[in-house]
Image (tube, rainbow, N blue to C red):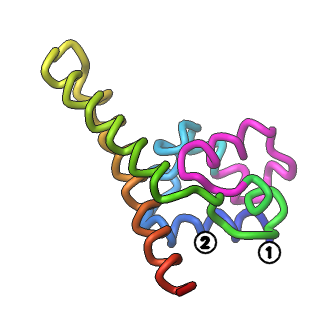
Amino acid sequence: MELKDRIEQLKKYLNIRSNNELATKVGITRQTLDKVTNGDTKDPRSSFFIRFSEAFGVSLEWMITGKGNMMSEVSESDCQKQVNKLEKELHEIELEANISKKEISVLKNMISILNEKIDFLTKNSSKKE
């Protein structure tokens, strides 16, 4: 499976409809993502893969080689702790109101992604039982 196929698989898994939306969530330009998915960039920098891993918990091994599980092994407890921490930070930020709506939106997006990871972990752990 080529990198562009793995990116498409990840988009489907995360219910992301466009490269623009994916690029925004990862923190790269749409043009950079388009170059990779169109094959114009054959060997993206390591930071490209790291951004996906950090944004969605994608396994670096899977992202780079296509081998192994798509999602990194993360415990449900760790995810829930991170969600709780982000929700608390978001609440404090909203109270202070010294932050832009865009920054609040980014934080809410991070919380949403973590909740998706928890759902994924929950589904997979119940399948193993």
Q: Which residue is drawn at 21% across and 23% down?
A: 92
Q: Mark 2 points at which residue?
A: 9
Question: Above or below — where is 128 with respect to 94?
Answer: below
Q: Do the residues labelled 2 and 1 touch (CB within 8 Å)?
A: yes
Label disc, if present, on residue 117 of the rendered structure: none
Q: Residue at x 58, y 52 (%)?
A: 57
Question: Above or below — where is 41 with respect to 75?
Answer: above
Dot 1, crowdedness within 10 Å: few (<14), some or many (≥20)? few
Magenta residues (range): 34-59
Task: Return the residue nearer the eye: 78 or 54.
Answer: 78
Q: Residue at x 57, y 38 (%)?
A: 29
SS at mark 1?
loop
Task: Return the residue nearer the eye: 63 or 96.
Answer: 96
**Cα–Cα span, label 2 and label 1:** 10 Å
Label disc, if present, on residue 1 of the rendered structure: 1
Q: Where is residue 103 in the image (x, y as percent from the top left)?
A: 32, 27
- Of callouts 2 and 1, the N-terminal one: 1
Q: Residue at x 47, y 59 (%)?
A: 76
**Amino acid found under the numbered disc labelled 2:** Gln
Is residue 96 left or right of 72 when viewed as pictured?
A: left
Q: Position of residue 129 (x, y in %)?
A: 53, 87
**Amino acid found under the numbered disc labelled 1:** Met
Task: Return the residue nearer the eye: 61 or 128.
Answer: 128
Q: Where is residue 71 in the image (x, y as percent from the top left)?
A: 62, 62
